[in-house]
Structure formats: structure tokens, C-alpha cells
Image (spheres, grey):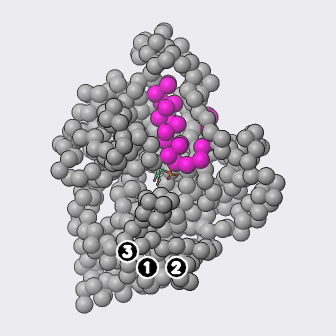
Amino acid sequence: MPLGVASSFQAYDPYPLFMTDARGSRIEDADGNEYIDFDMAFGVLAAGHSHPILAEVLAGRVANGTCYTFPVEDGVLLAEEIKQRFGCDLVRFSNSGTEATMDAIRVARGFTGREKLLKFEGGYHGHHDDVLVSIQPPRELIGAPEAPVTVPASAGLPRSRVEETVVAPYNNAEALEAILARHGPEIAAIIIEPVQFNIGVVPPLPGFLERVRELATQHGAVLIFDEVKTGVVLAYGGATEWFGVKPDLFCLAKSIGGGVPIGAFGGRGEVMSVIERIPDRAADPTTGLTHSTIPGGATRVAHLGTFNGNPLSMAAGVTVLTRILTRDAYPRLSAMGDRLTAGCQAVIDEHSLPGYAINVGPKGCVMFTPSRVTNYRDFIGLDSELWAASFFYLANRGILLPPGPDDQWTLSVQHTDADVDRYVSTFRDFAAELTA
Ligand SMILES: Cc1ncc(COP(=O)(O)O)c(C=O)c1O
């Protein structure tokens, strides 16, 4: 395996930990060290590791077949549950967040008959070509805020694809307006992580998401919320509920499956139904689009996948959403997140560390930057040496965080206040040793 791992996110210096067991809030490595897990598989596990209810359901499911490629009732129940939480009309399933955003973008293109995508700098939406740009570009390449440069995040991306994605700085409504004034009529979709959770924790400034919503409508672009990290984690109805701003489409993955591979996307019936038939737009006075604008003249958007809606993932999803991450789980998750942030902030204040603690619900982190980060351009100033010192100090004392300053802690329904307090006390030891 290149780098010795299955996904390049798993590779880091000096070597990745190999894990053998996990239950509740604990995970154990191949050397027998136990950690309180605050990484929770990059935020997959708001239900915690092997929740007893889920473990029982999945054991029963495995004994009855794990893949049929025929629809199953649990898929219908899960779609109904997602509809209720997100107030949408139609849902489809995939196997990962990458597939969910890829499919949602294709639906948006089919619906609008347009080709360009707008994403925000610092946003990660998976590893397909359209979105693998301007994730953490080098400062010298990013250009001015009103005209950011689209910077490939991987070799192997065709230039023609890179050119299809327009980039805007997050939390900068004026820059977005200027960019849309230039590209508006070509933009099929605006994709956004409502909270930027791939550069630490960067919440939207007051009014920003509302303005993005208005501008998307004004320019006839489909607004896609990438709720892969936020959905069913921040709140029962994800960031859509937390911020009270409704997208046209949203993408889910990670925590909806409790650790089983899954993805989903859904939204307005009018948009999603291009999977059945692209509407005839000849008579549409606002867009003036006709089928002839769609390459090849296809009359519907393909959404396919052997594993889509497989019985194992559907059983996991229904169980997690209806029996574990129920409405009453969220106040406690948020309270634990607030407790961890308050504890870390107190340590930062006591020891005058350059940084601050921040959370949105059960997801948070210590940002090692002297001032508040509002978008990727501020994040570039993060002290990665200080972050690394804290990561290893904590890991060597049984507190496991994601292996990068761009990720954050995720608390689960199986974490306790005692787990949170142990993190804070270990962080206090770190700060004391560092400043001694
Ligand atoms: C916001 C967001 N979107 C999409 C993805 C891609 O999801 P996956 O890794 O399941 O393909 C991620 C993964 O971290 C993510 O954080």
C-alpha cells in the first residue's frame, strides 16, 4: 500500500497507529495502549464505538445477508427519517460522503443545465475531481479574496475539470457577491460546509449563510449544504436546523451509519426528481434552458451504485437515527462539547497559550492561532508545531485526537463528563510543562 495505509489521511509521522479494538468512548492500539477516543473516526461516531443496540442489530443483519442489490424496507424507513429531520422531499443513498457530494453536484448540473461549481476555500467535500481544489492551498497561490485562484489539491486532475470549479473565501459575503457577479449565470451549484470543519472549527459569521442562500437564489444556483460532518451531529436536523437556513440539496455520510459505510443526499423534490426526468425548460423564462444545453441530450441524471441502499448500511442508519441519536441525545452532546471547550479555554487563559478553544455542539478543537479564524486565509497562520506538540503529548497520555490541526474532536453519546474532564486535566499538564 502506498504510504502503508488504505487512505492517505491515515498516514502521518512518525507512523500511523494500528488499532485493534474499540468500544464506547475507548479505542485500543496494536501495542495494547488504550485511549479515550476524541477523534471518533474523523467524526463518524456520534453514536460511539459499537453501540450495544447497533452491535446487536448488525449481528442479526449479517446472519441474513449483507447485500441484495434489491430495495429493502430499512431503506424506506431511513429515507423517511431523513426527510423528517431535514424537511426535504426526496433522498437517495450512496456509500460515502465523496459519493454523496459527487451525486448532488451532478443532480444540480442536470437541474440547471449549467456546468460550473462554486466551492469555498478550505472546504473539503471528498476526493472526486470537482471538489479536490483549494482545500489547503499554499498562501502564495491563492490570489486576492475577490478573485481566488482555483488550486488543485492533487496531481492527476484534468485542467478542464479544475477550471469548472470557481472558488470563494468563506465568511466573506462581499467577495462572494463580486465572484457571482462575474460567474453567476454559469454556476450550477454552490457547495458549502455550513461550519468549516476541515480547517479546525470555523463557524459562519452572523448572516453569512443567510446571504449565501439569498445569492444562490438570486443567481439561479442550487445551494448544497455538505452536512457530512454536521448532519445528525450538531442537532437532530443537522446544521440546517442549527442555523435555520435551508439549502436546496444536502449531503450526509459519516455519523448516519454509526461506523458502517454510508452516504445520502436529498432535498427539494423539484431538484432531486431530475434523477427521474429532467424538466423541459424551453418555457422557463428565467433560465431559457432547453435540453439541447445538456451534453448528449440526456433526459435524466444517472445515480447508480451496486452498494447503494445495501441492507447492512440501511439497518445501521435506521438504528442509529431512530434508537441512538434521538432528539433527546442532542442537549447532552452539546453540553459535553461546551464543557470541554470551557475547560480547554480555562487552561489557555491560565497559561497564556496563543490560541482559543471553540466548539459547535459536540465538535470542537483548540485553534492554535493568536486571533479568531474566520476563513482559510486566517487558518494559514496556525502554529502547527504547537498543535503537534499537544497532539503527541495527549496521545502519549491516552487522549486521542485526529492526527491533524485541520480536524476536531467529536463527542459521542457514549462519552462521559469524566472523559471530558480527563482531556482537560491532561491538556492542563501539557500547558504547565510547555510553559514551565
Ligand atoms: C465535509 C465533508 N464532506 C465530504 C467528505 C467525504 O466523505 P468520505 O470520506 O466519506 O468520502 C468529508 C470527509 O471527511 C467531509 O468532511
User: 54 or 135, which is in the foreground?
Assistant: 135
Q: Residue at x 62, y 68 (%)?
A: 49
Q: In front: mark 2 or mark 3?
A: 3
Dominant SS type (magenta): helix
Q: Nearer the viewer, mark 3 or mark 1?
A: 3
Name the quarter where the C terminus is drawn: bottom left
**Which of the marked residues, 1 or 2, is nearer the chain's N terminus?**
2
Give the CA distance from mark 1 to mark 2: 7 Å
Look at the picture and state if 385 lies above or below 90.
below
Q: Which residue is mark 2?
A: 35
Q: Kindly identify the residue that appears in the image at 48 percent across and 68 percent down.
A: 39
In the image, which residues are magenta? 89-111
| 375 vs 324: above or below | above
The answer to whether the residue labelled 3 contacts the one labelled 1, judged by CB atoms less than 8 Å apart, is: no
Which disc is residue 87 wearing?
none
Q: Secondary structure at mark 2?
A: strand
Write down the residue under mark 3: 14
Query: What type is the residue that disc 1 sits on?
Result: Ala
Say if residue 393 shows up in the picture: yes
Q: Is residue 29 left or right of residue 128?
A: right
